[in-house]
Amino acid sequence: MGKPVDILALKAGVLEDFAAHAARTRDSRTRLYAPGATERVHQCPICGADSADSVLRLIVYGAAYHQCPECSHCYVLDRPTKTALEQFYASDAYYAAAYTDIRAAETRVRQVAVPKAEWMVEQFERLYGRKPQSILDVGAGGGHFVHACKQMGLEARGIELSAASRDFCRSHFGFDLDSVNFTEAWHAFQGVDVVTFWGVIEHVPDPLDLLRAAARLLEGRDGLVVAEVPRWESLSTAVQTAFPDFVVRHLDPLGHIHCFTDSSIATAFELAGFAPAAAWYFGMDAYELTVQLATLLGENRVVGTLGPHIPVLQCAADQGRLSDEIVLAGRPAAIL
Ligand SMILES: [Zn+2]
């Protein structure tokens, strides 16, 4: 549990003008979810249960998050078409900016990517009694995690569809990321020990497609899959339910068309052919609460005043299993 992060340094650019950022986010998502621009999801994307039986939980910018009564997975019921989403990720420079901000790059490597790489190595070693040799990071963003793995002496490659992110990686870290569809091109990466998805599978229409491709790649090997996903049962969900007009992360329905429960991510692993082997709980719930209070009161001072207390509040959220992120690691098992 827990991940110590100087969250205010990480999001310096966002805090400079949170209200304007929220307004921009609200506008673009409301347009994306305009009636007629979406398509209905007919089955739970994880367990396949009929979506007609799902329960409405929250509406953010016109996007309705529903919960599956079978596996408890939460997902946007009427979502933008696959083409619309692909176009967005391929071209939206503003979205990529969060991950390619030069100021935050070193902080992101040191405080985000390195701890994740160390955790991944630790889990692999615990299962197999040796360190992994090669890593494939799917949805690598600006390449921070791949860079951290390389620094640790691991062979590491990354796949990234955003051209802006690949350019950043080349110019900032000096290596290239692959631009391929992993579900079709997975066999080009034979021999890797670990496949990672850091904040990736909640963005795609069918998360199981990506996990199943990883299962085929790792089949019969001492392998590990690692996926970080947002958690529905979290303090951030409660805070954003209270302030749905100021959502810029977590239940932002542009990126996160899924929000997992522990049950639904474990179900996804089992169905794809992975047995859960380790879980890590951490999040930005206390940060979310702080920023929303500052916005509600119109007082930036709130951020400075509450900021130093964020770590102790977040620690309580993590220990109470109310954190807004989970990283689940799994080993290859029989495909169901
Ligand atoms: Zn389900």
Image: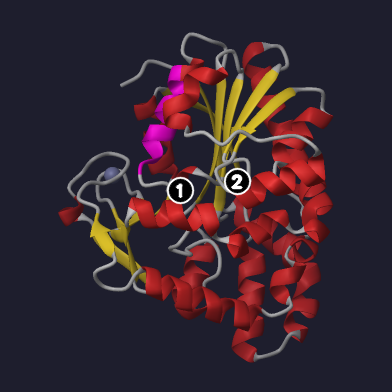
- Looking at the rendered structure, the number of numbered marks drawn on it comes to 2
- Asked whether 260 or 172 is in front, the reply is 172
Q: Is residue 60 visible?
A: no
Q: Who's the residue at 65% across and 35% down the image?
A: 177
Q: Position of residue 69 (x, y in %)?
A: 25, 50
Which is closer to the viewer, label 2 or label 1? Answer: 1
Q: Give the numbered dot on residue 202.
A: 1
Cα–Cα gap, marks 2 and 1: 17 Å
Q: Who's the residue at 47% across and 58% down the image?
A: 88
Q: Give the numbered dot on residue 309.
A: none
Mark positioned earlier in the residue sequence (2 or 1): 1
Q: Position of residue 296 (x, y in %)?
A: 59, 87
Contact? badges 2 and 1 (CB < 8 Å): no
Q: Position of residue 42 (x, y in %)?
A: 20, 50
Magenta residues, dominant SS class: helix
Secondary structure category for the residue under label 2: strand
| Residue 233 shown in magenta | no
Tell me where the magenta segment starts and ends, as one range.
206-216
Crowding at dot 2, Cα within 10 Å, few <14 / some 14-19 / many 20+, comes out as many
* Amino acid on which disc 1 is placed: Glu
Q: Is mark 1 within 8 Å of ligand 1?
A: no
Secondary structure category for the residue under label 1: helix
Q: Is mark 2 within 8 Å of ligand 1?
A: no
| Side of 131 where 51 appears, left or right | left
* Tag 2 residue: 281
Q: Quadrant of ligand 1?
A: top left
Q: Who's the residue at 48% across and 23% down the image?
A: 186
